[in-house]
Structure formats: C-alpha cells, structure tokens
Amino acid sequence: MSDQLYETQDTSKILMSANAYMTMRENLEQNIGSHKAKGFLFRYGRDFGEEAARNYLEKRERKGKIGKMHVRLGHVTDVTFNGKIVRHDDGTIECINTTGQWIESFEAAIQLKHHGLSTEPVCHTLCGFASGALSYEFGVSLIVIETKCFAKGDDCCEYEIRLEEDWLPEKQELVNLYQSDNILSELEMTYDALLQHKQLLERLSVFQTQLTQSVTERYSMAELIDEAQKLLDMPILIEDIHGQLLKQSGLSTEQRILLETPATLIYEKDVQNIAYYESAGYAKLSSPVTINKKHYATCSFIYMDGRVMEESDAMFLEKVASVVALCILYEEAQFEEQQRMRSSIIERLIHKQNIASIESSFKFLPFQFSGPYTTSVIRITPSKKAVGDLLDYHDQLMQLSRMFDTWRVPTILADIGEEIVLLTSHTVDARQFKNVCTKVLKKMNQQNANYTYALGMSRLFTHFTSFEQSLKEARIAQRFENQQLFTDYEELGMLGDLVTNMSIEQIHDLAQKMLKGLYDYNNPRKKELLYTLYIYLLNNQRLKETMEYLNLSIGGIQYRIKQIEEQLEDTLKNASLAAYALLLIQALLLLGEVKFT
C-alpha cells in the first residue's frame, strides 16, 4: 500500500505516502526511542480514529461500519470482525469474543520491506486508529491490541478488543504506554530534550576549543588544569598511575588532606570509561588519561560541600582527560628529548670524548651543573616472581629521572648495559643527596614491587678526567654486600682503596698467599668453609651469632673453625691474619670473583 488517506473535520484530506510514514517512524525511534515511539504511533492513530469516526457518524448517521474505515483510508485491504460489542440497558458496554484480522496491514508491509522480521507486533497505528474510533462510537475507553502480526512471522495480523479495565490484569504496561500522554506533550518533551542536548553539545564544543587552544599555545599541564578549573568551576585532580599527585586546581590545603582518606568505588561505566568514588566528606569522578592505549595518569573531578555530580560531568571529564593526554604527550616528548641529551653526556664521558665539548652541553640542562661531582651506579635486582621477565631499563631510567627532577636534584642519568649511571652536581651536601637517594629508591621499591634497588656512590671529584676512576668507585660501592639502599665509597675505607688501586691479579696473588687451602673456592667444600670464615669474621669471631646465622650447632661451628685453621695453617686468634682474611674475602666479593648466594 503506497498511500494512506485521513479525513479531518472539515472534510479536507491528508495524503501520506508509506515512505513518509516510514521516515516519521524511524525519526521517532532515533529521537525518543523505540519504546516511546510505540506509544506515540498508537496515540497518533487514536487521534485520527476519533476524528474520522466523528466525521463519519455525523455525516452519515450510521453505525456498525467503523471497521471498514481502515479499508477506505488505505490502511489495509480488508478487515474481519468476530463477536460483538453490546450496550446494555444500564449503559454499560461489554465486549463478547471481539476479535478480528487486518488483511495486508500497511505497517506490517513497511516493517518487512525495510527492516525484516520483528520480534513483536508492529501495527500500533492501526491499534490506535481502531481504539480511537470505537471509543468515540461507544463513549467508553476501548483498547484494540494486536495479538498476532504478519511482520513477526505469524500467519496474519490479528487483533482483540476489550474495555481498558479488562486489559489491565495482563497488559497494564502496554495500556499505560498507549494512554500515557498525547502527541503534543511527547513532541514538547522531545524538543526540550533535544534543545538541552544541543546546548550541552555547544557548551562542550566551546570548552574543548578553549582547552585545545591552550595546548596549541604550549600551556604547561599546571596552566591547562587551572584553565579547565576556571571554566568549569570544578576542583580537578591529576594523579600518576601510582596515585602520586601531578597537579591539582581548586583545592585548599585542608581539602587536599581530606582527599588522603580512602574512597570506596561506587560504580564503573566501561562505555564512558569513568569510575565514581565516595568517601567521608567528598566524592570523586575519575577517568583514565590514555595514550596509545597505555594508562599514563588519572583525571578526577572532586565534589565537596554538598555539590553533587551532574549527568553531563562525565562528558566534560572525558574532554579534560583527552586534552591532558595531549599535554602529557607533548611534555613526554620534551622530557624524552631532554633525557636523551643528558644520557649522551654520560655516554660521551665513558667513551672519553672531548671534555670541553661535553661541558658545553651543560648550558642546555634545566639546572646549574658544576663541580664538585659524584658518580653513582644503581643496581636493579628482580625478585623471584620477576625472574625471567624482561626488565625495561629505559622505563626504569625515566621513572628515576622524573623523581630526581621532582626533588630538584641536579643529576643526569643514563642506562648503561644493565645498570643506571648517575652523574650529580653537588651544589647540595652529600648528606642531603643521600637522604634524597634513599627516599627515591624506597619509592621505586613501592612502585616496582618485583624489583629491589641498591646505589653505590663515588668520592667527590672536580674534573672529568677523574670520571673513569669515579665510575669504578661507584661500582665497587654498589657491589658491597651490606643490605643497604645507599653505599658511599668513602665508607669502604681500606677495602675500597685495595680494590680500586690493585689489579685483579694482584688481589688474587694476595688471597692465594693469605687463604692458602681455602683459596680453592671452586671446590664446594672449600667454598663452604670460606663462607663460614667470612660470616665468623663479620660477627667478630662470636660463636653464638655465627651459629644462629648459619643455623649450625655449637659443635658444628667449632668443627668447621678447626678445619678452617688447618687450611690457613694458622690460628684465627692471630688478629692480623683475621683482619687481612676478611679484607681479601670482601675484595673478592666486590670484584665479583666469589659469590656466596
């Protein structure tokens, strides 16, 4: 059926093509949803049904032909009707087995042609038209509901007529939808919603334009967040993936302290990629800041002092997070470039390139860099859980570099082989540098639970001709087994000088002469005795501490000491022998020639 015809009260006729009807239905579903569209189409049909019935009955003063109006107006090719609608003497209306069929429904034909099979009846306009016409004729609310539909695969479009109250026990939801409102209020509601949505989109567009302009003008992240906070009048918090504050705006010191109280996750929305948290005194709406699908930071709106989240906040938060991502990407590129320049200084020093040329690079550093200097080496050791995992030294380098920058320590870093090398300008005293290093390494342990960190630092030097020596000192200090995060080469005393100033061959010669039979440490039994001697001497030759450390009985320790003295061909009561033996074992350990673990 290509066209439908509707009569109005003044007998003018409105012709609507099937395509126009389809367009109207599709736009309704897009703008108010398919569920509300069903109610709209029913009321659309009901209003025309009432007017058509009024016009038909007033003009012809006939009854009983209302069902045929469907055919005359082009809705169907035929209508069947069974049962009867009875008006009793007391004025009540009764529907007795009132059913029927619509033959070749235009709504079913449109559904099948343009959308295929439906999962439910689709002839809502026909139901509305028949309901409006019959309700007008009988003066009570009669509802026509489709029970079978050709568009959903049934053999026909079948309907049933009942009084409204008789439908309620089994079809209350559908009846409420059909009767809930009139066409005008539905359109007004839709218009208001569309207007609000349009205004929101305009506000979002202006907001994003302003923030993007800030990025193009090379605003820092701090300036960018301040700008966003000013535009939204909303406290904003940016944290790194470890929960450390990167930037905040709009929060007082007291409010920041309040934020340290843990918040409980209330809900997450994967589609919008947001999470909402609540705690005593505040709430937080958070969104990840992602770059190339990698989580770099978290952006949050903070709600305090009775302020509640609005539905549109998630969209504004998404815009802030996306612009923060651009800012981070720009800052990352700058930081990477700066870090490459810093690393090249250390690499050039290692390769003994022109010192004057290297020193000329210092003017590009963001801090004053002058003597005296120290060199440090950081060792990163994987835990048992991380054994076999590939350690990303560059990522570790970037984490460390950012931390030292945060503490405003004038130091440059480079990943050299399997260690991180630091070159530090000591405009601050060594004690302050040690405190900062200890805090940085503890923080690295927290952020990278599968790794442990240990740093060794050289003595002070003033000219880069001493860099090679300082690097050697730092490596020696770093290898010293004292279970400390930070080891200063100065603390090694004579041991440091011994390892630094003597060749490996000279140290081996001394060890062979001093340790005699125990020097054969490739022999498992001799190595066990050498380890026992080392622990015994570290404990100042106290039997109880040595026994507890090695988990041996007093008799076992005494037996081993007797064997050790036989190998040394001397007694450990000889203080000189004991001191030199400990010094040489520690030297072999520092050089990596002997390993006990």
Image: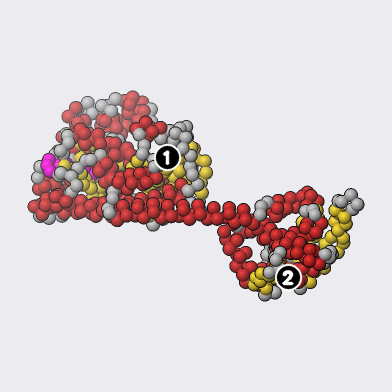
What residue is at 86 percent from the left and 51 percent from the top? 92
- Point out residue 166 in the picture as x, y percentages from the top left corner: 81, 51
Amino acid type at image mark 2: Leu
Identity of the residue drawn at 27% across and 27% down: 541
Which residue is the site of mark 1?
302
Q: Nearer the viewer, residue 396 or 408?
A: 408
Q: Is residue 292 above or below residue 468?
A: below
Counting residues from the N terminus, which is met first, the one under dot 1 or under dot 2? Answer: 2
The magenta-colored residue range is: 370-379
Q: Is residue 375 magenta?
A: yes
> Disc 1 and disc 2: Cα gap in Å?
60 Å
Left or right of residue 355, residue 200 in this image: right
- State the image quarter where residue 123 is shown: bottom right
What is the secondary structure assignment of the residue under circle 1?
strand
Q: What residue did someone put label 2 on?
A: 73
Give the image location of residue 389, x and y in percent.
38, 51
Relative height, residue 55 to residue 446 (above, below):
below
Image quarter in which the N terminus is found: bottom right
The secondary structure that dominates the magenta segment is strand
